[in-house]
C-alpha cells in the first residue's frame, strides 16, 4: 500500500500546512482507542509526508529525500524559533510542534524561493488583489453546486458517521512496510 500526506487547499478542509497534516496523521490513529504501540509515530508521519508522498505521486527516486540525484526541494527551519527551544528531538518537534512559523528558507529544485520566511519574487499585494477579485466570480459560478452540497450535507454526515462506527469498516492502522 502506498501512503502519503497532502493538503486539499485553504478553501475546504485545511490550510495547506504540511506540518499540521503530519501532526494530524500522528494523532488520528489515537482517535479509535488503539493501544500506543499501534499509534502512528512521528517518524512514520514524517515518512508519509516525504518519501511516502513521493511514492503516491509516482516520483520515488526523484523527490522525497535528501540524497544524490534527488531534486533539492528543502525546507530549512530556524532552530532559534520557540518551536525548537530547547532542541531535543528533531522529528518529534517537526511533527508535533512546528506550525510553519519556524520556516526560514525554502528551496525548490535547488532554487531559493523563500528567505527569512518571505516568498521571493512574488508581489503579495497584487496576488491578494487577484484572489479577492476572483471570489465573486467563483461564488457565482459555484452557487448551484454549493446549494446542492448544503442540501445533501446532513446525509453525507450521517453516512460518514455510520462508516466510522461500523466495526468491520472502522479505521484501522494500515502502514506500508519498507520495501
Image (spheres, rainbow, N blue to C red):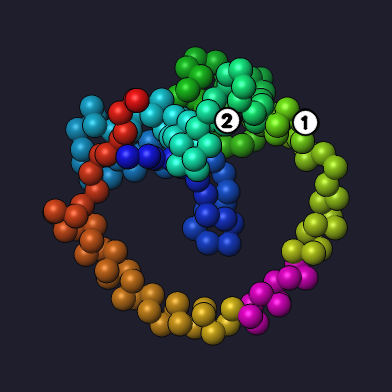
Name the element at disc 2: loop
Q: Residue 6, how many percent across, how many down?
A: 50, 45
Residue at x 28% of width, y 45% of height: 31
The residue shown at (81%, 51%) is: 124
Q: Could you tell me residue 137's position as x and y percent?
A: 71, 77
Say if 77 sits above or below 88 in the image: below
Horizontal side of residue 173 vs 75, given as left or right: left
| Dot 1 crowding, Cα within 10 Å, few <14, some 14–19, many 20+ | some
User: Which residue is disc 2 drawn over?
Assistant: 62
Q: Which residue matches tag 1?
A: 112
In the figure, 26 relative to 32: above or below? above
The secondary structure making up most of the magenta span is helix
Residue 41 location, quadrant: top left
- Residue drawn at (70%, 34%) of the image: 108
Look at the image and give the residue range highlighted in magenta.
132-141
Q: How far apart in space, not on screen, are marks 2 and 1 (Cα)?
A: 19 Å
Locate residue 35, reporting x and y percent: 19, 33
Q: Secondary structure at mark 1?
A: strand
Which quadrant of the rendered structure holds the C terminus? top left
Magenta stretch contains residue 138? yes
- The answer to which of 117 and 140 lies nearer the viewer is 140
Badge 2 density bin: few <14, some 14–19, many ≥20, Cα 10 Å = some
Tell me if 4 is positioned left or right of 16 in this view. Answer: left
Based on the displayed image, in which of its 4 quarters is residue 65 positioned?
top right
Magenta stretch holds residue 27: no
**Where, by quadrant of the figure, is residue 2 drawn?**
top left
Residue lying farthest left?
A: 167
State whether residue 95 appears in this view.
no
Amino acid at each position: 500500500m502506498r501512503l502519503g500526506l497532502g493538503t486539499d487547499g485553504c478553501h475546504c478542509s485545511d490550510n495547506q500546512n504540511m506540518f499540521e497534516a503530519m501532526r494530524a496523521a500522528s494523532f488520528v490513529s489515537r482517535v479509535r482507542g488503539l493501544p500506543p504501540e499501534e499509534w502512528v509515530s512521528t517518524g512514520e508521519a514524517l515518512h508519509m509526508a516525504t518519501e511516502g508522498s513521493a511514492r503516491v505521486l509516482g516520483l520515488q527516486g526523484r523527490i522525497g529525500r535528501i540524497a544524490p540525484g534527488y531534486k533539492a526541494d528543502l525546507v530549512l527551519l530556524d532552530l532559534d524559533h520557540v518551536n525548537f527551544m530547547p532542541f531535543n528531538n528533531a522529528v518529534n518537534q517537526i511533527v508535533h510542534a512546528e506550525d510553519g512559523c519556524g520556516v526560514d528558507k525554502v528551496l525548490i529544485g535547488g532554487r531559493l524561493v523563500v528567505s527569512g520566511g518571505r516568498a521571493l519574487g512574488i508581489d503579495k499585494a497584487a496576488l491578494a488583489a487577484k484572489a479577492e477579485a476572483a471570489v465573486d466570480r467563483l461564488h457565482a459560478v459555484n452557487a448551484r453546486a454549493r446549494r446542492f452540497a448544503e442540501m445533501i450535507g446532513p446525509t453525507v454526515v450521517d453516512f460518514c458517521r455510520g462508516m466510522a462506527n461500523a466495526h468491520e469498516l472502522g479505521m484501522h492502522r494500515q502502514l506500508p512496510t519498507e520495501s
